[in-house]
């Protein structure tokens, strides 16, 4: 490192510009001059880093007997902007309050629906009490009501639909996510999701003109001949009943379960598949161990969403279930569901007790939905307990 040349050498490349300073003894200080170190260049060794520019605040020497004045500092443009902008606490608090209001609105809506159902069904509840949910009578003429046949029909058709739809939905999802050729994946996915967009009344019309004759002439006699010994397929077969309603419900919830299951399976990291295959597993073992096991929580959630759709379906079920309040072991028997009885008889309810009984059936459907969701939560907890890492 060479020494700096004298300040008087004007032509030297190492000249240090001189700043203007107050002379000792002046009464007032002049404005502080800023000297940039970028113009203080020195000879550097090859390979050494360039000097970092900095801003130096030069403080003049105070006069004798005068108090020293602090150095003047300058803020960068970013710091100056942030200082003028403020802390933003008001905006953050307002945003948090709006989000809290949105979250609380869910509880308010559910509480409002429950309150209306309880108030409007007060007359029926005062007449029958909790026995309303365990009685089988339904006689609007004599004013004798009970919701047990409708609860039975709702549960039978919904779980029958799950028994049919879940294996099919899992097969479709596994094929699309793991086995389907790339050129066929998009068309099959589109057709599967298209089933979810078809209105329920169209499903009902198709079931009336296509499914009911098949049940009456082909499928019903076959089941009676092969599985009649079980007691589930006995009695007269008119083509309408629990089995027909369960089949049409299974078709309606199939795209919901398969689409969600497919998305969940495709979200499993490829490292899981590669790790299982690296251990010598077959394709099926890879799907079972590496994919389905890591997707089981999401699959349970997809099944519960399909069950919720089946519990609340109205029009399509009303058109093919037979609409007869009866509890029967045979799946050929006509029946009723909670949603279908409300759709069929609400406009015909003449007396206050009749109307109150129908609203109490709506309350029963609401409670069944709550119970089913609680069971779903218990199932998810049973799957994920002791394995929080795999659940994530």
Image (cartoon, rainbow, N blue to C red):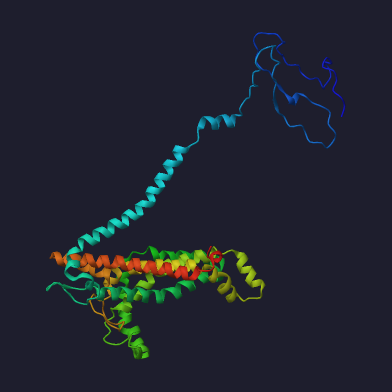
State the residue at coordinates (74%, 26%).
38
Nearer to me, 125 or 331: 125
Measured from the top left, where is residue 110 in percent x and y?
32, 57
Measured from the top left, where is residue 347 in percent x and y?
18, 64
State the residue at coordinates (12%, 74%).
142
State the residue at coordinates (58%, 70%).
290
Nearer to me, 223 or 182: 223
Measured from the top left, where is residue 53 in percent x and y?
72, 29
| Quarter containing the N terminus | top right
Left or right of 351 on screen, residue 257: right
The image shows residue 270, relative to residue 25, as above or below, that is below
Please tell me in which quadrant of the rendered image residue 82 appears.
top right
Nearer to me, 249 or 12: 12
Left or right of 86 on screen, residue 118: left
Measured from the top left, where is residue 131 in percent x and y?
22, 73
Left or right of 266 on screen, residue 166: left
- Is residue 104 visible in the rendered image? The answer is yes
Nearer to me, 236 or 73: 73
Please tell me in which quadrant of the rendered image residue 234 appears.
bottom left
Left or right of 327 on screen, residue 295: right
Please tell me in which quadrant of the rendered image residue 54 appears.
top right
């Amino acid at each position: 490192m060479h020494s700096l040349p004298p300040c008087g050498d004007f032509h030297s490349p190492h000249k240090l510009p001189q700043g203007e300073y107050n002379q000792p003894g002046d009464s007032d200080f002049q404005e502080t001059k800023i000297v940039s170190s970028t113009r203080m260049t020195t000879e550097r060794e090859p390979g050494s880093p360039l000097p970092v520019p900095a801003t130096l605040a030069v403080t003049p020497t105070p006069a004798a007997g005068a108090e020293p004045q602090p150095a003047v500092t300058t803020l960068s443009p970013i710091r100056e902007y942030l200082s003028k902008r403020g802390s933003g606490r008001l905006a953050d608090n307002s945003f948090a309050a709006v989000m809290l209001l949105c979250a609380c609105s869910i509880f308010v809506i559910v509480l409002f629906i429950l309150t209306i159902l309880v108030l409007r069904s007060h007359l029926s509840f005062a007449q029958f009490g909790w026995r309303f949910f365990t009685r089988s009578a339904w006689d609007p003429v004599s004013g004798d009501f009970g919701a047990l046949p409708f609860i039975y029909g709702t549960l039978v058709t919904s779980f029958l639909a799950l028994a049919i739809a879940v294996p099919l939905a899992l097969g479709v999802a596994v094929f699309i996510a793991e086995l389907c050729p790339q050129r066929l994946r998009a068309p099959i996915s589109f057709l599967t999701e298209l089933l979810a967009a078809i209105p329920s009344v169209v499903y009902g019309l198709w079931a009336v003109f296509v499914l009911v004759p098949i049940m009456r002439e082909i499928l019903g006699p076959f089941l009676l001949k092969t599985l009649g010994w079980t007691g589930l397929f006995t009695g007269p077969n008119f083509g309408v009943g629990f089995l027909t309603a369960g089949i049409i419900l299974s078709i309606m919830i199939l795209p919901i379960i398969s689409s969600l299951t497919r998305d969940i399976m495709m979200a499993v990291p490829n490292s899981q598949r590669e790790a299982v295959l690296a251990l010598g597993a077959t394709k099926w073992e890879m799907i079972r161990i590496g994919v389905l096991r890591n997707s089981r929580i999401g699959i349970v959630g997809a099944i519960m969403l399909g069950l919720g759709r089946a519990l609340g379906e109205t029009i399509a079920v009303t058109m093919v279930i037979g609409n007869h309040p009866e509890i029967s072991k045979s799946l050929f028997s006509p029946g009723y569901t909670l949603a279908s009885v409300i759709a069929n008889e609400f406009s015909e309810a003449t007396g206050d007790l009749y109307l109150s009984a129908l609203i109490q059936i709506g309350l029963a459907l609401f409670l069944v939905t709550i119970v089913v969701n609680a069971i779903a939560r218990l199932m998810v907890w049973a799957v994920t307990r002791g394995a929080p890492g795999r659940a994530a």
